[in-house]
Image (tube, rainbow, N blue to C red):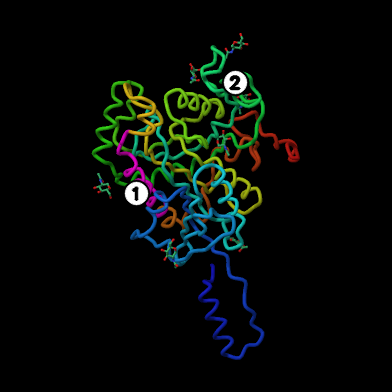
Amino acid sequence: MRLSLLATVSALASSALAGSVTARWPEPCPIAPKVVIISMFDPEAGVWYGIPEFDVLAQNISVPGLSPIYPDVHCTADGEVCQVTTGESEINAAVTISSLVASPSFNFTSTYFFIAGIAGANPKVLTIGSVAFAKYAVQVALQYELDAREMPSNWTTGYVPLGSTSPGVYPQSIYGTEVFEVNDALRSLAIGFARTAVLNDSSTAVAYRALYNTTPSYAPATMPPSIVPCDVATSDVYYSGNLLSEAFDNTTYLYTNGSGIYCMTAQEDNASLAALLRGAKAGKVDFSRIIVMRAGSNFDRPHAGESDTDNLFYVHSGGFAPSVENVYLAGIKVVEGILDGWEETFQYGVKPTNYIGDIFGTLGGTPDFGPGGVFNDDPTAGQG
Ligand SMILES: *[C@@H]1O[C@H](CO)[C@@H](O)[C@H](O)[C@H]1NC(C)=O
Ligand SMILES: *[C@@H]1O[C@H](CO)[C@@H](O)[C@H](O)[C@H]1NC(C)=O
Ligand SMILES: *[C@@H]1O[C@H](CO)[C@@H](O)[C@H](O)[C@H]1NC(C)=O
Ligand SMILES: *[C@@H]1O[C@H](CO)[C@@H](O)[C@H](O)[C@H]1NC(C)=O
Ligand SMILES: *[C@@H]1O[C@H](CO)[C@@H](O)[C@H](O)[C@H]1NC(C)=O
Ligand SMILES: *[C@@H]1O[C@H](CO)[C@@H](O)[C@H](O)[C@H]1NC(C)=O
Ligand SMILES: *[C@@H]1O[C@H](CO)[C@@H](O)[C@H](O)[C@H]1NC(C)=O
């Protein structure tokens, strides 16, 4: 068990008073959180402050390499729960999480990393206000792109997977961050916890969802908010509209060999997962202890009769406030579930039953997507 710094200091103080001359000032014990909540920007972070369950503002630990606007990791006094804000988009997420994982102030070997943010929602799978738990995170815009006005007339999209020469053809050049897969057994437990939450909604969102009812495939968009297992696309470009959403839905399907269900789009998850994967490879984090949760704040494409620009810039769908609220309402159940079940279950970890890791098979095992693990036979392959 971790001796708190305060206890260490007072023990030292009393041994000094007792005349011990051999006592030396110890290195501060690293904080070993049970849960680290990863937020991407202020609205997602703010829902964890001033809540009745715990106070993550009790300790602020500044970590070199974090975002200049979010320089501190916030932790409860006992260090059991911490929260960090990455800043938005892939570069901010990757650098923040890499710096965090490398920080000597923490010991993350038993920590659950809980990505908890908002996202664009695919109306074919879920609605605004709903909360999705992903198994796959796919970097969909990691492709060639021609402006669609200059593309060959037989292309369906201006995006072409790297190393290929036509849209929809499996990429021939693999960078390694295309797809990440996280622990499905842990996801199922998290979904069970989240389903005990009563989700928030708004009357504006109720009215806005109803506008999607003229397109039969958008039936999921018209339902009240719920907890949904489905996957998240990552793209620095904040895309919107029917064609790009469909193109990246296709990319998700292609890159996950047909297993991924494209329902969320956001700007960070692959990058955070890439940093955690490298931390896992270095023995600093446990990649089987990652949960990716995103709540739908807006639709990725318009309803029938609405323009793409209206969907992107001008409509007030009423989804933002409930989505942020639901990050907390669903998320707190997940955090409490892990803390309450720590002794019995979570300290030991939840054994994954699926492949976990990246497209290279970096952590071992054989990916159920991608061209096959490049490190499976020769661990030095692909290096240098
Ligand atoms: C931690 O930082 C927050 C602001 O980000 C502040 O409100 C809080 O008081 C700080 N906590 C401590 C213990 O200084
Ligand atoms: C980190 O915590 C684990 C147990 O969770 C422990 O075995 C390990 O020694 C700790 N490492 C450091 C550097 O404190
Ligand atoms: C994020 O994931 C997507 C899909 O899994 C993948 O195409 C992309 O390369 C990943 N990006 C990063 C930076 O990991
Ligand atoms: C488009 O047409 C070109 C030229 O005929 C052909 O080489 C290519 O395979 C076609 N691409 C697709 C996606 O059908
Ligand atoms: C949603 O949350 C807002 C803000 O906390 C609150 O005013 C509203 O009553 C809640 N609505 C529902 C349906 O829970
Ligand atoms: C997505 O894939 C389907 C099936 O291959 C195809 O019909 C459709 O045109 C593709 N959409 C885009 C935007 O590429
Ligand atoms: C995924 O699909 C690609 C392209 O069809 C194929 O080459 C690869 O073997 C598939 N991977 C798995 C694990 O099935």
Identified by mark 1, the residue type is Leu
Determine crowd level at label 1: few under 14, some 14-19, many 20+ residues with C-alpha closer than 10 A: many
Mark 2: which amino acid? Val
The residue shown at (46%, 52%) is 37
Could you tell which of marks 2 and 1 lies nearer the N-terminus?
Answer: 2
Nearer to the camera, 72 or 284: 72
Does the beta carbon of the residue at mark 1 sit less than 8 Å from ligand 5?
Answer: no
**Residue at the disc numbered 1:** 329
The label number, if any, that marks residue 62 in the structure image: none
- Ligand 4 lies under 8 Å from the Cβ of mark 2: yes
Q: Which mark is residue 169?
A: 2
**Residue 80: x and y, percent?**
47, 61
Q: What residue range appears in magenta? A: 315-336
Q: Secondary structure at mark 1?
A: helix
Asked if the magenta segment contains residue 4, the reply would be: no
The answer to whether residue 44 is left or right of residue 25 is left
Query: Does the stretch in magenta take in 328?
Result: yes
Q: Residue at x 54, y 64 (%)?
A: 31
Give the percent coordinates (x, y) of residue 164. 64, 22
